[in-house]
Image (spheres, grey):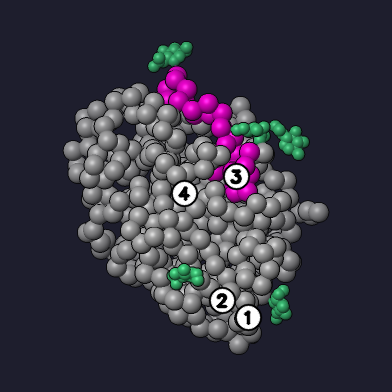
């Protein structure tokens, strides 16, 4: 199961029959603030959710010109504490809320709202399947889709005209209240997903925006902000470039790792220290925005647990320390290609005002550092979820096979 909550108030970002406007080349940001709904009262085991997603990683099939760039901005929502991209088909007003996922590359919908084909849309005879790994109670979660081509509206003035998408054949309860997934992973991950040929690659949204001339380079930036309430529009994808207003200082780039299977994803090498102590020697891992926590292998997790004096909390499945000992926490340092990215004590904890969401209490602070599951591929030495990306702006550069990270105005925020 991914998420299982009540549906939320959706605002109309995709008004019917909005006339076509050219994509903003000057790069004005399109950000709309959404209202806060009354949050749901149910707690959820976010560790199991993330571990289940990670188990699918190693299974991916192995694989293998830039003038001054226009940029286009796409706003993102934080719903039920997951980031979603609100997307419409053609001129239709139905909003599909898709999980923003750098760890997979197929964009599919239809888990909740049925697919309404636009007049230009084409549904093919090809089957497509996307494997999200072993889920705790439901067995393997495989989404069976039909391959279709249709126009997607990503923002008021940002349309991708002929995008390959998966249309779910059967409503998958495991994705409720999400409608599907917005795939931001590398194109190679789509290999083997279409039934008509195992070597058939499916163009990602980034590929199509580039092919249609909307952007001039295959690069995008991802900006999140820490928040302790849901259904807020505070995230953004910048297509074709980066949004410098979201960075504080330079973007540091690191090459995609050589190590398999992290090299098929947005993967890189890093080491991690807690205070002055190295808890993880240089290893390869990935950025995975579809997850919430930051997961480390057992040895690093145990070292972190010992250094912080945290204890495992059975109810939330997370590490906790008594609230009055929060001030003793030290920073975690992610050392990437010689540059140190500091995850402050505040950035290491789940927002205290929403401890109820994870089943916690006010008496403790809960760490966003979790343990990778037993069945994780040894080549995945860490997985950084969106709690990391809320503190650092990230850049995904296909042509140069590199990932950029920059500090943001929220890197040192005391928001949690
Ligand atoms: C959307 O509506 C406009 C104006 O009616 C029309 O020109 C355009 O072809 C429509 N686009 C799609 C994808 O239906
Ligand atoms: C998808 O198809 C596979 C193989 O045909 C099947 O085992 C699985 O149950 C299907 N999944 C769903 C959610 O229908
Ligand atoms: C959309 O792309 C598919 C696959 O490349 C192609 O077969 C189809 O003709 C395209 N449709 C349009 C309207 O360009
Ligand atoms: C990163 O990759 C580029 C291009 O392959 C190469 O020139 C450069 O030396 C690499 N940098 C590091 C630090 O390995
Ligand atoms: C990253 O680490 C792996 C081993 O974990 C190593 O094979 C590789 O050379 C390292 N460097 C890069 C740039 O991938
Ligand atoms: C970390 O190392 C620095 C420099 O060696 C030292 O000044 C500092 O006291 C150390 N901090 C801790 C918590 O040990």
Q: CA distance from mark 4 to mark 1?
A: 30 Å
User: Mark 3 and mark 4 in contact (Cβ < 8 Å)?
Assistant: no
Label 2 vs 1, first from the N-terminus: 1
Is 156 rendered above or below residue 26?
Answer: below
Numbered range of the magenta stretch: 259-286
**Which secondary structure, mark 1?**
strand
244 to the left or right of 96? right
Of the pair 262 and 23, the residue shown nearer to us: 262
User: Mark 1 and mark 2 in contact (Cβ < 8 Å)?
Assistant: yes
Question: Which mark, by number, is residue 93?
Answer: none
The percent coordinates of residue 180 (x first, y second) are 47, 67
- Per the image, the residue denoted by label 2 is 146
Assign the N terminus to one quadrant of the image: bottom left
User: Mark 3 and mark 2 in contact (Cβ < 8 Å)?
Assistant: no
Of the pair 101 and 25, the residue shown nearer to us: 101
The percent coordinates of residue 213 (x first, y second) are 74, 66
Res 231 visible: no
The total of numbered circles placed on residues is 4
Label 3 vs 1, first from the N-terminus: 1
- Per the image, the residue denoted by label 1 is 124
Of the pair 260 and 296, the residue shown nearer to us: 260
Give the residue drawn at x 56%, y 61%.
Answer: 183
Ligand 5: does it lie within 8 Å of the C-beta at label 3? no
- Dot 1: within a 10 Å radius of its alpha carbon, few (fewer than 14), some, or many (20 or more) residues? few
Give the residue drawn at x 60%, y 39%.
Answer: 268
Give the residue drawn at x 51%, y 56%.
Answer: 101
Q: Residue 199 falls in which quadrant of the image?
A: bottom right
Q: CA distance from mark 2 to mark 1?
A: 7 Å
- Per the image, the residue denoted by label 4 is 54
Is 58 rendered above or below residue 178?
Answer: above
């Amino acid at each position: 199961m991914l998420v299982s909550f009540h549906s939320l108030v959706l605002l109309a970002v995709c008004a019917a029959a909005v006339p076509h406007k050219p994509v903003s080349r000057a790069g004005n940001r399109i950000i709309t603030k959404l209202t806060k709904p009354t949050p749901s009262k149910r707690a959820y085991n976010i560790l199991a959710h993330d571990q289940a997603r990670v188990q699918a990683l190693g299974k991916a099939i192995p694989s293998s010109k830039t003038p001054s760039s226009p940029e286009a901005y796409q706003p993102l929502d934080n719903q039920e504490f997951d980031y979603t991209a609100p997307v419409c088909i053609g001129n239709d007003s139905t909003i599909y809320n898709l999980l923003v996922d750098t760890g997979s590359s197929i964009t599919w919908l239809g888990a909740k709202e049925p697919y309404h084909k636009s007049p230009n849309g084409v549904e093919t005879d090809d089957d497509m399947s996307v494997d999200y790994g072993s889920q705790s109670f439901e067995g393997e979660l495989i989404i069976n889709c039909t391959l279709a081509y249709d126009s997607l509206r990503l923002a008021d003035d940002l349309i991708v005209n002929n995008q390959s998408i998966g249309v779910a054949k059967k409503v998958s309860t495991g994705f409720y209240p999400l409608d599907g997934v917005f795939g931001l992973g590398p194109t190679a991950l789509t290999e083997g997903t279409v039934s008509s040929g195992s070597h058939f690659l499916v163009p990602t949204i980034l590929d199509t925006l580039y092919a249609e001339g909307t952007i001039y380079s295959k690069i995008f930036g991802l900006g999140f902000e820490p928040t302790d309430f849901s259904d807020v529009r505070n995230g953004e994808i910048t297509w074709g470039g980066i949004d410098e207003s979201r960075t504080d200082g330079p973007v540091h780039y690191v090459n995609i790792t050589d190590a398999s299977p992290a090299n098929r994803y947005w993967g890189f090498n890093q080491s991690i220290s807690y205070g002055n102590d190295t808890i993880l020697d240089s290893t390869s891992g990935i950025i995975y925005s579809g997850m919430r926590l930051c997961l480390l292998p057992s040895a690093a997790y145990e070292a972190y647990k010992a250094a912080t004096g945290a204890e495992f909390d059975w109810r939330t499945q997370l590490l906790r320390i008594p609230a009055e000992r929060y001030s003793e926490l030290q920073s975690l340092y992610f050392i990437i290609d010689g540059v140190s990215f500091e995850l402050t004590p505040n950035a290491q904890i789940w927002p205290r005002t929403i401890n109820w969401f994870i089943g916690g209490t006010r008496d403790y602070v809960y760490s966003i550092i979790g343990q990778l599951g037993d069945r994780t591929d040894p080549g995945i030495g860490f997985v950084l979820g969106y709690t990391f990306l809320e503190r650092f702006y990230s850049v995904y550069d296909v042509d140069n096979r590199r990932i950029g990270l920059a500090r943001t105005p929220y890197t040192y925020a005391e928001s949690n």
